[in-house]
Image: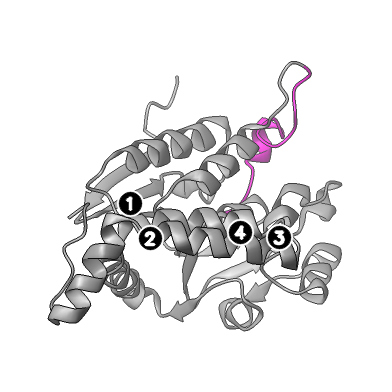
Amino acid sequence: MTDDRPEIRTETKGRARWIWIEREDRRNAMNKRVVAGIERAVIAAAEDPAIRAIVLTGAGQRAFCAGADLSGGTDTFILGLDEPKTDFGRLARTMREIGIPTIARVNGDCVAGGMGLMAMCDLAVAADHARFGLPEAKVGVFPMQVLVFLRGMIGARAINELCLTGAFIDAARAREIGLVNHVVPFAELDARVEALMASLREMSPVAMRRGKYAIAAMAGMGFAEALAFAETSIAVTSLTSDATEGLAAFNARRKPRWTAD
């Protein structure tokens, strides 16, 4: 008998698209269907002009995501002979390329590939009972793809401790080393996410798209190249309709009316 319950659920709340991993009984662990479902939901949200942000989370309170569901093997994270990109890698590329902000709502433990899923997001809010860990070496593998995100997010010593010892850290420590932006009691988690959303809604959608692109592009540049890129980018951004509207609103002491509103 097959289980026909959906593993991904989406809901539009105001100008945000919420995406839940609905595998609470498996600690919201990822399999190929989960990763593909998240990617489809992210693409659909990015193509909807009414959506200004994406919130990614897990069902319940136990886990945000426990990583790969190892009961089904590791095919979500390992290449097949006839495919140059993993499912997880495709999702990561999609998350990097979309032009709207993404928020990880870390409702519980964030482990292994779940750390990568959280780190793909632009912002992260964690419940204070959540734990974070990279225990892959305990089962004979290593968090290779997660390192792609963490190396630009936290320091080398913190990365080494997480990867080499497999030790878990609490939410307070995760915030201290830069893994998450905010830590709140679980009862306040949605309110903190909504507060972030309120701030994001004040921002220019055009500036956000160009800014997210610039952040990603400059990550791979040296100083001189990044500065030259930034000089060109600010000149182009200042010519957009949102920049014209933002300046007019500032001088008129009113709220701007962005093109996407």
Within 10 Å of disc 1 (Cα), the crowding (few <14, some 14-19, many 20+) is many
Rounded to the nearest angstrom, the CA distance separating label 2 from label 1 is 22 Å
Disc assigned to residue 207: 2
Disc assigned to residue 229: 4
The residue pinned by badge 3 equals: 225
Give left or right: position of 90 versus 191. Answer: right
Classify mark 4: helix, strand or loop. Answer: helix
- Tell me which numbered mark, 1 or 3, is placed earlier along the sequence: 1
Give left or right: position of 188 versus 162. Answer: left
- Tell me which numbered mark, 2 or 3, is placed earlier along the sequence: 2
Q: What residue is rendered at 58% in x and 83% in y?
A: 172
Q: Is residue 60 visible?
A: no
Q: Quadrant of the N terminus?
A: top left
Q: What residue is rendered at 82% in x and 76% in y?
A: 157
Pick whichever, 27 or 106, lies toward us: 106
Classify mark 2: helix, strand or loop. Answer: helix
Classify mark 3: helix, strand or loop. Answer: helix
Rounded to the nearest angstrom, the CA distance separating label 3 from label 4 is 6 Å
Vertical arrangement, residue 232 with respect to residue 39, above or below: below
Do residues under tags 2 and 3 come within 8 Å of each other at their CB atoms?
no
Tell me the kind of residue under disc 1. Trp
Tell me the kind of residue under disc 3. Glu
Q: Is residue 251 magenta?
A: no
Magenta stretch? 65-81
Image position, residue 168 (x, y; %): 70, 70
Do residues under tags 1 and 3 come within 8 Å of each other at their CB atoms?
no
Rounded to the nearest angstrom, the CA distance separating label 1 from label 4 is 33 Å
Q: Nearer the viewer, mark 1 or mark 4?
A: 4
Image position, residue 4 (x, y; %): 38, 26
Classify mark 1: helix, strand or loop. Answer: strand
